[in-house]
Image: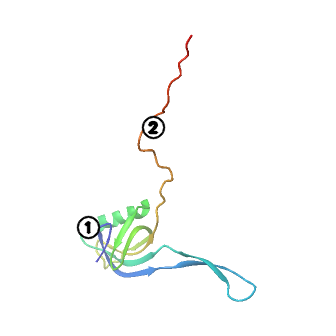
Amino acid sequence: MAFINNTYIFVQDEQLQRGVEISEHPVESGLDITDNIKRNSVKIYLSGEIVGENAASDLSLITSLHHGGKLVKYSGRNILNNAVIESFDTSHPIDIYGGCAFDMVLKEIRVAKPAYVAPTAKTTKGGTQQVQNN
């Protein structure tokens, strides 16, 4: 049993991809020097079926999440928050009535926050007004 944003999908297989990027710099002798290791985004490769009496609306919802680049939460044998649907491929074999088989890739992302923060309180100019006497 698995869910994407509380929409049920039948998942037959989940494959997780976890990786790191390792920078290397050559030296005159010996092993290369490594000075940075950075974690890559986690990806989950899913295959399964969208079936049941709500299959058409579930397919439409997942397609709109994919095309709109919306954030999704996946909850199955593994859990992935803050993800997007990187690819969503469907097939419609004769033995799946009213639904479809699918292959999907979910990718973990981090959303950038705006650097500018609007002031919360009104600021007033302090001081006194100069008056000219004639």
Secondary structure under badge 2? loop
Residue closest to the eye, 21 or 107: 21
- Is residue 122 placed above or below 28 in the rendered structure? above
SS state under label 1? loop
**Residue that badge 1 annotates:** 54
Q: Amino acid at mark 2?
A: Thr
Residue 107 percent coordinates (x, y): 45, 71
Quadrant the C terminus occupies: top right
Q: Is residue 4 above or below residue 112?
A: below
Q: Which residue is mark 2?
A: 123
Give me the C-alpha separation between circle 1 and circle 2: 54 Å
Which residue occupies 34% across, 63% down?
Answer: 61
- Residues at discs 1 and 2 in contact (Cβ within 8 Å): no
Q: The N terminus appears in which quarter of the rendering?
A: bottom left
Quarter residue 88 falls in: bottom left
Relative height, residue 127 to residue 1 (above, below): above
Residue 55 x/y as whole percent? 29, 69
* Badge number at residue 119: none
**Picture quadrant of residue 67:** bottom left
Q: Crowding at label 1, few (<14), some or many (≥20) Cα neighbours within 10 Å?
A: few
In this orientation, which residue lies closer to the viewer: 114 or 73?
114
